[in-house]
């Protein structure tokens, strides 16, 4: 076999192996959450996973609009779960600053279900749930409904404080 044929054979084998091993950058299936990397919200692109828990992925569907001085508004996410399928949410977060006079002693995240990502930011004011994450470790649920289980982790990603660890906390604790 000449060198050109050897090279072509190598390329074909490498391409075949690459395809067989699933050379794609999409998130892993929900039943394999430990393999999904959470992307920092500040650098996430639409389609990337912001939160990965044992039973859900929170995927960015509409970028957040920055607010003054510390808010992230009208962001869209979809929640993918094996049991309930996909649900879309509009999310807002107000991130506070510990120890600064005049600032509340908590981060605040709130949201509501929407039909599709383009609905994020279309209608303000009406939220279904709200979660206050006090700096003393207390979580306070407000609103009409209980906040989803993933809301706390999403707030931690959105309101990045100090050296936020982008590794999946759920996977580390199991």
Image: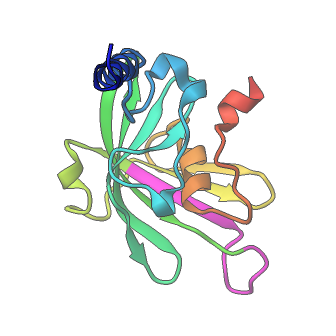
Residue 128, how many percent across, how many down? Answer: 39, 47
| Camera-nearest residue between 21 and 156 | 21
As displayed, is residue 34 above or below residue 105?
above
In the rendered structure, the answer to whether residue 173 lies left or right of residue 28 reads right
Residue 38, how many percent across, how many down? Answer: 54, 43
As displayed, is residue 167 above or below residue 124?
above
Which residue: 43% across, 45% down? 144
Q: Which residues are magenta?
A: 98-111
Assess whether residue 11 is covered by the magenta stretch: no
As displayed, is residue 122 above or below residue 128?
below
| Camera-nearest residue between 95 and 56 | 56
Which residue: 31% across, 29% down? 86
How many circles with numbers are drawn on the protein?
0
Quarter location, residue 22 = top left
Residue 83, how many percent across, how many down? Answer: 40, 15
Question: Is residue 111 in view from this perspective?
Answer: yes
Q: How is the image coloured?
A: rainbow
Of the 4 image quadrants, the one containing the C terminus is: top right
| Camera-nearest residue between 168 and 146 | 168
Residue 131, how many percent across, how many down? Answer: 56, 52
As displayed, is residue 116 above or below residue 12?
below
Of the 4 image quadrants, the one containing the N terminus is: top left
Quarter location, residue 103 = bottom right
Give the residue at the far bottom of this rendering.
Answer: 101
Assess whether residue 104 is covered by the magenta stretch: yes
Quarter location, residue 40 = bottom right
Which residue: 46% across, 33% down? 57
Question: Is residue 147 in view from this perspective?
Answer: no
In the rendered structure, the answer to whether residue 96 lies left or right of residue 92 reads right
């Amino acid at each position: 076999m000449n060198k050109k044929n050897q090279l072509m054979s190598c390329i074909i084998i490498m391409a075949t192996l690459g395809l067989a091993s699933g050379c794609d950058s999409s998130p892993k299936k929900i039943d394999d959450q430990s393999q999904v990397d959470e992307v920092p919200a500040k650098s996430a692109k639409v389609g990337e996973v912001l939160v990965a828990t044992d039973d859900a992925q929170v995927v960015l569907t509409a970028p957040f609009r920055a607010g003054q001085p510390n808010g992230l508004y009208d962001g869209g996410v979809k929640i993918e779960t094996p049991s309930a399928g996909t649900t879309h949410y509009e999310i807002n977060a107000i991130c506070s600053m510990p120890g600064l006079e005049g600032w509340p002693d908590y981060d605040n995240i709130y949201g509501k279900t929407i039909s599709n990502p383009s609905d994020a930011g279309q209608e303000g004011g009406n939220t279904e749930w709200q979660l206050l994450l006090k700096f003393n470790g207390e979580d306070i649920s407000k609103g009409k409904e209980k906040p989803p289980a993933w809301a706390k982790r999403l707030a931690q990603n959105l309101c990045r404080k100090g050296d936020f660890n982008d590794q999946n906390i759920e996977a580390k604790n199991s």
